Image: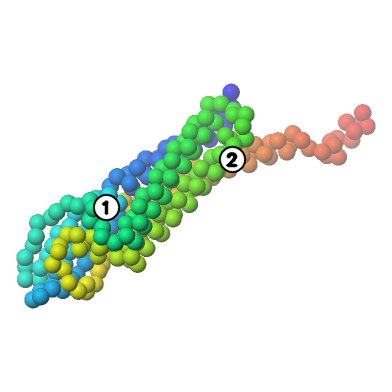
Amino acid sequence: MPSRKKTCMFASAFCTCVSSFVVVCVALATPQWVSSEVRFSRTGSNVTISLNYGLFSGTCEQFVDAGLQVSETTFQVADALGSAGTRALNVATIVLLVLALLSSLLSSGFTCTNAVSNPYQTFLGPLGVYTWNSASGVLILLAMILFPVNVEGNGLSEDLAHGCSTSLQTHIGSKHTYGYSYWIMLLIIFLNVASLIIIYFYDHARYSKKKEQERPIENAPKDVILF
């Protein structure tokens, strides 16, 4: 059976890993990744398409300068995308988050195992927790980079706006505001770092204790050496 100290520290790390798993689920499920206002010109007036969307679904409204407003409609991102480039990056972002989800799940399993037992395999110990937490953090960071690249550089919102209205002509400009579904990924990274710090302190304390028990003979008392 593991010591009380090990159980407490790995149980704490388990809580942070499970929290990370839950937050990744929230990020995937909620459609508040970005709000965009995309302006287009057309014959006789300008049109503003207001979009709120996530990785899977969103809503759009159409406003005409003359004061006309088209009622809000719901769309599926995969169906509304017309560009292969924006579709590919959106799928890549989803894949990264799914992999991060699996990494968080594995990390939760490893920390739970260590909280209740002493695994014989080295990789099932702190090394495994380091690996899966680091992988999850890196994948989340890549997703946080890839999504704005798709929005800002690849014209994701503009592509979706064309799916909301068929009479759009020249694109005038866009304004993007990232929502909580995007920013909570920072919380995931923080939770992963917290897990790593907890396990590091446990591992460091264990290593220090082991070195203390294996002091070389020259550090032993002289009477012990003479004996």
Callout 1 amino acid: Ala
Q: Is residue 62 visible?
A: yes
The residue beneath circle 2 is 127
Mark carried by residue 166: none
Mark 1, other Cα within 10 Å: few <14 / some 14–19 / many ≥20: some
Residue 190: in sight, yes or no? no
Against 171, residue 14 (above or below) is above
Distance from disc 2 to disc 1, alpha carbons, whole Å, reads 38 Å
Query: If you read the primary sequence from the N terminus, does the residue marked by circle 2 or circle 1 appear first?
Result: 1
Which residue is farthest top?
Answer: 1
- Circle number at residue 78: 1
Quadrant of the snapshot with the N terminus = top right
Residue depicted at 17% across the width and 64% down the height? 49
Q: Is residue 165 left or right of residue 193?
A: left
- Circle 2 packing at 10 Å, graded few (<14), some (14-19), many (20+), is some
Residue 158 percent location from the top left of the image:
25, 65
| Above-or-below relation of 71 to 18 | below
Q: Secondary structure at mark 1?
A: helix
Q: Quadrant of the C terminus?
A: top right
Residue nearest the viewer, comparing 129 with 190:
129
**Residue type at numbered disc 2:** Leu
